Structures are given as structure tokens and as C-alpha cells.
Amino acid sequence: MKGIIGVDVGTTGCRACVYDVQWTLISSASTEYPLYMPQTSWAEQNPEEIYNGVISVIKRALEKSNKYGNNILAMSLSTVFHSLILVDKNCNALYPMLTWADLRSQKYSEYIKEYYDSVEIYKKTGCPVHPMYPLSKILWFKNEFPEIFSKTYKFISIKEYLIHKLFNKYIVDRSIASGTGVYNINNLCWDENILKILEIEGTQLSEVVSTTHYETHMNEKIAEEINLNIDTPVVIGAGDGVLSAVGTGAVNIGQAVATIGTSGAVRVLIEIPKTDIKGRTWCYNLTDEYWVAGGAINNGGIVLRWLRDNFAPCEQVISRKIDIDPYDMLTDYAKTIPAGSNGLVMLPYFLGERSPNWNANARGILFGLHLQHKKEHIIRATMEGIIYRMYSLYIALKDVTGDINEIRVSGSFVRSKVWLQIMADVFGKVISKPDALEGAAFGAAILGLFSIGQIKNIKEGTDNIKIVEKFYPNLENHKKYEKIYNIYERIYWNLQKEFEEIAEIQRTSE
């Protein structure tokens, strides 16, 4: 039986999945790697740790599947957006990788907004000016670490780092390029005017290729290590966010996919690039025929992880003893609390925020604390607060792409029925859970088979995706959530100056 490997390289972990050509999951393997946060607003990683993790999961997934050599038709890659690595001529990192969550370049985003036409930059690139994008990050290096900047041979992403390891080439897919803030999505090239702002040459960026581009004849030692035929096509693939839309089957007009993993996003497939007159959404490439409009939040499951690590030590010990996931214990706690958490509201801006307001200075807030509130209330308020953020993306996206008739879900949060019911109640919409839970990895596999001509288009690969469960909104809860959401929004807008001041204190106190 022939198979394909879909590899999803995320923020805090990666996964490799082997599927047969009937889309049955044969085997999978996953691992985690560290996210380093040495200062407020900094979020770094070691690209070599990620590379080692990727190699290990591919190797283990193949070992589990007993599929080797010629039985694998292709391997296709999905990687996280907005990473930045400065490398020398030998592709050695000159500095730790900056992730999408790294917001240290905030003042350079403000500089761009002050001295350049940020609206025009957004229209050209599909990326609002914000410190998560490599555009601002490169400017930070230019001014804060000029000695490293001057030594840089290439400015690349984790995708390019992995591809260079495999094939000793600097190429990047159009999807990852479209998430840099430097790539012109209308002319399909690195934007010359933006390169001038950064004072770099186009040759210091990788050659841009289609997401369906593939390479063969990988590094012999790597091929031998993972036990894969050296001539197996490796499809460069796309960004994880856009592939999660494919992996859940949200590939038709009026369908959206809502994802919560470490971060979160709502996305819709479109046939031509579109930007928002209010600048709330982004637009990234998927294939030569499709683009994805959407919005993303910094603070998804990472906030619940913070809650677990800092306020649930007993639950972690107990969960290990009885062999259950500690998150299951936390969400069970939330289940005991009514909708609205008895008036406790969480604004989960732990890492600043992206769409729709693009405010890197925003900070987390618990509003309405009362002596009646317990840990259970805080857990539910956190889950609700994250969904409020997702709801704000949904509202903005409807204005750009038109009515959304179906919402499919993906990401780690789909394992929690409590969380999915909260989403249904806040959105006031039916939430559909597909059977393809490894959204980005499955999306990568679909794109991979399309790239090598095994299927006619990416929609063909989604035909067998089934909806296994639906969550229907409780209208009474929806009315309550509408009222709280309005309060939630007012809290945010009334604290703009305070956000700015406290963020500055945090940045200068280290």
C-alpha cells in the first residue's frame, strides 16, 4: 500500500502523520520542544532543536507504519508562520529564532507607521504592520544588533532552515513568504520598496516557489537516518494555518475553520487576495488558485497552559497517577461553572494581541473578581475569554469574505466538549467537529498528493472528511455571552493608555 507523510511543524511541537491513499491514518508521532522567553515580549527558539524534533517524528512515524522507501509517494511540509532566523553562508544561526510570539520589535512597527504608509504596506503584503511579522523583526536587528545584521547572509524562516538541511537550497513557498510583510501578494515578488526600508537586497531572501513545488534527492545521511528513499519527493508545502483549513475540509464558499492550539485563528478560503478596509485581517497564499483570509490571536491554548503550570500543580500530580490529561481535569472544573463565570471576565492578552486590533501592548486582565470566585471560575473565564477573541475575528472576517454558513474546528481544543460548547454559545452558531483532527498535517498530505499529480485538486482530498459531532448553541447562554462580550470590548478600549504604560514599565524593568 502506498502512503504519504504529512509533517506539521508548530510553535511548541511537531507531528508527522503517515496516511494511505484512501486517507486512513496509518501512524503518527509527535514531540515537543522549548519556547524560550528571556524577557517580556521575547519568544525565541533554537532552530536546531526544532530540526532534531522534526527528524525524530518522521523517523518514528515511519517505523510505526512499516512503510519505507518506494512505498512513500511523497512527504509534504506544514510549518508555522512568521519565524525569523538570521544565518551565515553555512546556514548557521547567528541568533536564536524569533517566533511569531516575539514582540520585541514593537517600537519599529511604530516607526514604520510613523514614517511610511502602513496602509499601503498592508494592501501590498496582506500583513498589517505588527511586530509579529519579520518586516519589523528585521528592522529590530538592523538597529539593535547591527553587527549581526551586517554578517547575515540570508533572512529565513524555519521552513527554509529545514529545506536547506534536506537539500542545501534556499527556497521558500509562497505561503510562508506571504506571511513576512515583505512579499507583494499582488505582484508575487519581494517588494522592492519594502526592501529599501530594511536596507537589504532581494538576494538576502530565498527564492519564492509555489506551495506545490517539490524537491528530490535529499541529503543522503538524513534519508538514511529516517529510512526514506533518497528520491522521495518532498513537497515544500505551506503555512500551518492555511493548511489547517484544507485539513478540516473548509474549502468551499461560506465555510470557515476555527483553530485553537498554542495560538488561535479563524480562516476562510478565497480565490483572489483580499484585504480589509479596516486592516483587521490578513491574507496569505495557499496554492496558485487559492488564498486564505483570516485573523489570528496570540493567546490561545498557551494561556490555559500558563494556568495549568502555575495554578494546578496538584492536578498535574493526580493526572499522572491516574493517567489522564491534566487539561481534561481543568475543563471538567469549568463544566461545573455556569456560562459567564458568575461575572468574571478574562482578557487573555498575555502576549499582546494580533487580529483584529493589532495591539502588542495589550496585557491580560481578570475583571470582576469577587470572593465567591474560585479556581474553577478562573479556568472557565479563561476559556471564555479566548473564545471572545475568536468571536471578534469571526465578526471581522464576515465583513471581508461575506456570510459564513459553517464553522469547522481544529487544533487541540477540539478534545474539550466544554470548550466547543462555549464556542457554539458565544458565536450563536452550530460548530462542526470533523474527523480529521490533525488538521495541518492532513492538509499537508492533501497538498502533497495534489502536488505530485495523484489527485486533481485540493478539494478532492477533502471529500472523505466527515463531521463526527455538532455543537448547537444554547440561545439563553448566547444572550448572556452577548452582554458580557460587549463589556469585554469596553474594558479593552477603555484601557488603551494603561496598556501602553504598563507594557513600557515591563519592557524597561528587565
Image (cartoon, rainbow, N blue to C red):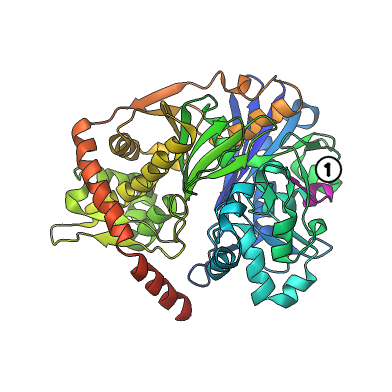
Quadrant in the picture for residue 332: top left
Quadrant in the picture for residue 241: top right
Whether residue 339 is visible to the viewer of this picture, yes or no, is: no
Mark 1 neighbour class, 10 Å CA radius: few under 14, some 14 to 19, many 20 or more: many
Q: Residue at x 49, y 33 (%)?
A: 401
Q: Residue at x 78, y 37 (%)?
A: 228
Q: Is 408 inside the magenta-drawn segment?
A: no
Q: Residue furthest bottom?
A: 509
Q: Residue at x 41, y 25 (%)?
A: 405
What is the secondary structure assignment of the residue under circle 1? loop
Q: Amino acid at mark 1?
A: Met
Whether residue 331 is visible to the viewer of this picture, yes or no, is: yes
- Return the x and y of residue 203 as percentages of the image width and height: 82, 57
Query: In this picture, is 478 found above or below 500?
Result: above
- Return the x and y of residue 1 as percentages of the image width and height: 71, 20
Q: Residue at x 38, y 64 (%)?
A: 363
**Camera-side residue of 349 and 461:** 349
- Return the x and y of residue 80 as percentages of the image width and height: 60, 48
- Return the x and y of residue 127 as percentages of the image width and height: 58, 50
Residue stretch rendered in magenta on the structure: 164-172
* Residue assigned mark 1: 218
**Camera-side residue of 475 and 422:** 475
Q: Is 169 inside the magenta-drawn segment?
A: yes
Quadrant in the picture for residue 361: bottom left
Query: In this picture, is 116 found above or below 7?
Result: below
Query: In this picture, is 193 found above or below 71?
Result: below
